[in-house]
Image (cartoon, rainbow, N blue to C red):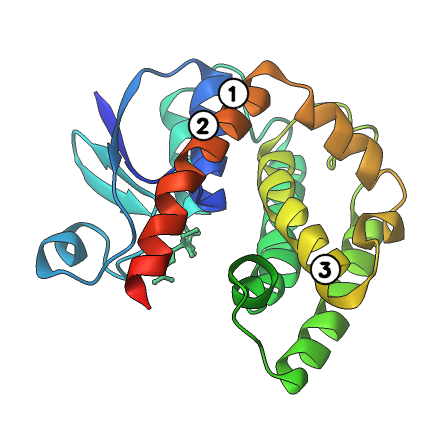
Amino acid sequence: MLTLIGFDVSNYFNMVKLALAIKGIEYKTVILYPNQTDEYLLKSPMGKVPALETDQGVLTETNVILEYLDEAYPNSPLYPGSTFEKAKIRELVKMAELYIELPARRCHSEAFFGQKVDDLTKKEVKRALYKGIEGIARSAKFNPYLAGEQLTAADIVFLYSADLAAAVAGKLFAVDLLEMAPGAKQLMDKLNQLDDVIQIAEDRKLANIEFKKYIASLS
Ligand SMILES: N[C@@H](CCC(=O)N[C@@H](CS)C(=O)NCC(=O)O)C(=O)O
């Protein structure tokens, strides 16, 4: 059986959780925070979560895990369509991670943990997020899903990237990021109504209590 390693507050962990839920794959969970212990680095070379233990070995990097799951469990495909359509989904996944999730992450400490981020970083992040969401607006179909009529891996990655990025943009720049991509808000609303997404949000809320204690213990 697959084992998913990570913790329920992690947006990347939740991307994999949602993919597993959509596909109805059975798995176990090992709750673990990212760390640089020798033991964990043997599994996850960067010490990050999530990691997915399979019969053949451990996989890391969320987009890779999503593609693995889709090939190993072809039901409810997350990369449906022709070779070109699959590539377009991968393009959207990559854009959401590179241009939305990663820039916003640079400001998570101030937006979520009350630790100041310097003004230059904030300026860079604001500019990067504007460019990112404008790029997504050009590239995505929002019909109603990112790649068209079917929910794909792009929606999963966008959901758990854009929510945090929108919170960062709202808190730090007083900007409604999702408004800059027509259709994005409606898509987020639609995705947030899915039973699996509601369950993941509940798990996340519960896990956040322990996570906050853990973060406080680090300082
Ligand atoms: N590129 C990785 C990113 C995963 C990631 O950044 N996870 C966070 C938790 S949400 C983490 O492990 N952070 C600890 C670290 O960066 O060392 C992926 O796609 O899975």
Write down the quadrant of residue 150 in the picture.
top right
Distance from the alpha carbon under mark 1 to that under mark 3: 25 Å
Amino acid found under the numbered disc labelled 1: Gln
Q: Position of residue 66 (x, y in %)?
A: 45, 36
Question: What residue is pinned by disc 2?
Answer: 203
Give the quadrant of the N terminus: top left
* C-beta proximity under 8 Å, tags 2 and 1: yes
Image quarter for ligand 1 equals: bottom left
Amino acid found under the numbered disc labelled 2: Asp
Q: Nearer the viewer, residue 153 or 193?
A: 193
Write down the quadrant of residue 140 in the picture.
top right
Q: Mark 1 or mark 3, which has the lower sequence index? A: 3
Q: Nearer the viewer, residue 145 or 179?
A: 179
Please say if 190 is above or below 91: above
Q: Is mark 1 within 8 Å of ligand 1?
A: no
Please tell me which residue is depicted at 53% across the width and 16% down the height of the picture: 76
Question: What residue is pinned by disc 1?
Answer: 199
Q: Position of residue 12 (x, y in %)?
A: 46, 45
- Dot 1: what SS? helix
- Dot 3: what SS? helix
**Image position of 172 (left or right of 72):** right
Question: What residue is pinned by disc 3?
Answer: 171
Q: Position of residue 23 (x, y in %)?
A: 46, 17
Q: Mark 3 or mark 2, which has the lower sequence index? A: 3
**Image position of 123 (left or right of 58):** right
**Image position of 25 (left or right of 84):** left
Please say if 143 is above or below 36: above
Number of numbered discs: 3
Amino acid found under the numbered disc labelled 3: Lys
Please tell me which residue is depicted at 13% across the width and 55% down the height of the picture: 42
Give the quadrant of the C terminus: bottom left
